[in-house]
Amino acid sequence: MAISVNPNPVKPPLGLRPRFIVDRDRALEILDACRRYVEESKPIEDAWWDEFREINDRMAIKYKSDQSIRGIRTCYSNRLDDL
């Protein structure tokens, strides 16, 4: 029985970015926006903190036993230090 190999395999279409990447990027965007507001002495929107907490809670549950969360939290803390 001969096995045929397709020399030009068809790649699947581009899908979605993984949720943890979207969450990480959004959390960092929120922190950057908070920093900009603090620099301008403007009040930070409560909805932003609510969304940040929601993302952080979701990531903490997903990665509670994973060491990679330390890197993400370090990223957050660097931005939080600026506030």
Image (cartoon, rainbow, N blue to C red):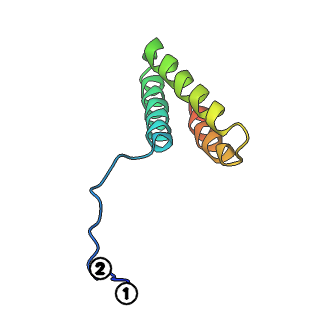
Count neighbours of disc 1 (C-alpha within 10 A) and say few if under 14, some if 14 to 19, many if 20 or more.
few
Q: x, y (%) of residue 46?
A: 47, 12
Q: For residue 6, which numbered disc appears in the image?
A: 2
Residue placed under numbered mark 1 in the picture: 2
User: What type is the residue that disc 2 sits on?
Assistant: Asn
Q: Residue at x 59, y 32 (%)?
A: 80
Label 2 element class? loop
Q: Residue at x 65, y 31 (%)?
A: 61
Q: Is residue 68 left or right of residue 1?
A: right
Q: Residue furthest bottom?
A: 2
Q: Residue at x 45, y 30 (%)?
A: 30
Q: Is residue 54 left or right of residue 18?
A: right
Q: x, y (%) of residue 10?
A: 26, 68
Quadrant, the C terminus: top right
Q: x, y (%) of residue 64?
A: 70, 36
Res. 45 visible in picture? no
Of residues 49 and 78, the one nearer the viewer is 49
Q: Is residue 51 left or right of residue 67?
A: left
Label 1 element class? loop
User: What type is the residue that disc 1 sits on?
Assistant: Ala
